Amino acid sequence: MSRLSTGTRKRRNYHHGDLKNALIAAGLDILSKEGVGALSLRSVAQKVGVSHAAPYAHFVDKQALIAAISTEGYERLYSAIRAAVDRHARDPAGQLVEGAWAYVSFALDDPDHFKVTMSGVVEKEQDYPAFVEVSKKSFALVVSIVEACQSNGVLPKGSPDLVAVGVWSLMHGLVSLLLENQIPRTLVDRMPVRTMLVATLSQVAHLEPPLTA
């Protein structure tokens, strides 16, 4: 069998397989290692091993690919926080802690995807309805947690949207410090990240002692 026919068969297999997810994974890898300037549909096609035209079956340009990567990240995050809320349906403080832990866990378990998702590199967001929908849905879920906590005295009164931004800022700040290795090693070595998380939340929330364990 010639080299040309082998390559053709490989490309056909990708088309019949999961090319879209393969392109997303390749794009994420390029973004995390080389930055947005190195990303193009040609570069992801080369990385995946398909023709330069193949990605256009799924993405009109590199911004569409970046939007798909960010959308997938938000979907993962939403699902994790939603699961935490459902597990603690009658416990607003538990929703707050476990929802925040889902956020931190996503960041630490998959920092590359987390950074791209939260990077703000998607231009003209209105052109990508799926991205807009899931990002709004994710924030609305955080607001619903805040409202439940406010109703039970776990979080202070005030605009739920603004309180949600405050809580999110605390979580994102903690994650950023952890990912950038800015927290002193002596503290990281002796204190679990979850303990840091609860201590951070305690700056704005009234948490019962068992939740701080």
Image: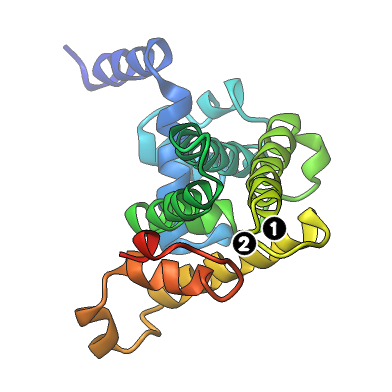
From this view, report whether residue 133 is shown above or below residue 156. above
Percent position of residue 34, x then y: 45, 62
Please report the residue visible at 27 percent of the width from the left and 80 percent of the height from the top.
188
Type of the residue with mark 2? Trp
| Image-based side of 168 in relation to 101, left or right | right
| Color scheme of the displayed model | rainbow
| Secondary structure type for disc 2 | helix
Q: Nearer the viewer, residue 53 or 89?
A: 89
| Image-based side of 211 in relation to 185, left or right | right
Type of the residue with mark 1? Ala
Q: Are marks 2 and 1 in contact (CB under 8 Å)?
A: yes
Percent position of residue 185, x then y: 26, 87
From this view, report whether residue 24 is shown above or below residue 191. above
Toward the left, the furthest residue is 1
Residue 30 in sight: no
Please report the residue visible at 26 percent of the width from the left and 77 percent of the height from the top.
191
Q: Nearer the viewer, residue 197 or 76?
A: 197
| Secondary structure type for disc 1 | helix
Quadrant of the image containing the C terminus: bottom left
Q: Nearer the viewer, residue 7 or 94?
A: 94
Percent position of residue 147, x then y: 71, 48
From this view, report whether residue 16 is shown above or below residue 87. above
Residue 114 in sight: yes
Question: Residue at label 2?
Answer: 168
* CA–CA distance in space, label 2 to label 1: 6 Å
Please report the residue visible at 47 percent of the width from the left and 44 percent of the height from the top.
27
Question: Residue at label 1?
Answer: 164
Quadrant of the image containing the N terminus: top left
How many marks the image carries: the answer is 2
Q: Nearer the viewer, residue 105 or 192?
A: 192
